[in-house]
Amino acid sequence: MPGDDWALEDLIFENREGRREAGLPVTEEPKDTSEYVEREWGNYNKSIYVSLDPGKKQDYSALIFLEPFIPFDEGTTRYTYHISRIHRFPLETPYPRISRVLKKVHTQLLKNQDIEYVYICIDVGGVGEAVADQIVELVSDHADIYRFTFTSGLRAKWHDARDLSVPKPQLASTLISLFESHRLWVAPQDKEQLSVLQEELMNYERKITASGYDKFGAVEKMGAHDDLISAISMAAYLAERNSSVGDPLW
């Protein structure tokens, strides 16, 4: 189980120039004023979505990074999304420790010259509300923290600028659309975590309830989870909304 001194270099992207060599974030360099930064797959727009699905005692907590970019040589101005980090915390990792990790991640990302906007998404259903309160207290007042509640309704509802209820079918349809249009690229550093995500995708299913509503989630069998999918779906949903109304969304 990771301690509070968990090496955050493992949570930051390895393609940041100079950071990997030094083993530390570069803080003295001025921010690049251009709108995009060129990286391995395209022009990245300097924003990152950090999404947390806090799990109950019998479930895993999941943390993912999503970065919007415009691919090279594809003749499009639509964003594609790079899942550059996926992490599943060990079972029974204390919520205060997860909160402290997220605070450190947020602090490190803001020091990165290639990142200007950090959006944090948190599932506040179930145990998530208490965890979200802890994170709001720990993370900087300037953080953009979006609280998601999953519902079985038909329409998303914004309760205020950063508090929303979203039907799971909408989240699932966002992911399906992105996968089918090849606009969601999964390439994390940790290949073991990638296999975990692949297993979740294989066990994710749609059911029709007796009342006629769609229900999405892990198949009802021992050991099936959908924490990584939930974390990715929140980040993808917010990123798609931001790209349709302008970025950043304040």
Image (cartoon, rainbow, N blue to C red):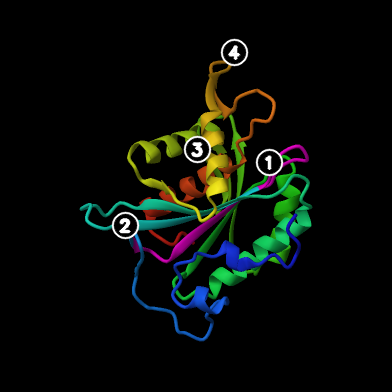
Residue 165 in view: no
Which residue is at 44% across, 75% downward?
17
Label 3 Cα crowd, 10 Å radius (few <14 / some 14-19 / many 20+) = many
**Amino acid type shown at disc 1:** Gly
Sequence order check, earlier mark of 1 and 4? 1
Q: Quadrant of residue 98?
A: bottom right
Residue 20 relative to residue 241: left or right:
right
Q: Give how far across and how far down residue 173 sits, in percent.
A: 44, 34
Q: Residues within 10 Å of mark 1 (few under 14, many from 20)?
A: some
For marks 4 and 3 on the same chain, the one whose residue lies earlier in the sequence = 3
CA gap, disc 3 to disc 1? 15 Å
Residue 93's tag is none
> Residue 47, position in %: x, y?
45, 63
* Mark 2, secondary structure of its residue: strand
Separation of marks 2 and 4 at Cα, in angstroms: 42 Å
92 vs 108, left or right, is: right
* SS at badge 1: loop
Residue 221: horizontal and vertical position, in percent?
66, 23
Per the model, the C-alpha gap separating discs 3 and 2 is 22 Å
Tell me which numbered mark, 3 or 2, is placed earlier along the sequence.
2
Q: Which residue is mark 1?
A: 125
Question: Upstream in the sequence, badge 2 or badge 4?
Answer: 2
| Disc 3 residue type (three-letter) | Leu
Q: Residue at x 34, y 42 (%)?
A: 182
In the image, which residues are magenta?
Answer: 43-61
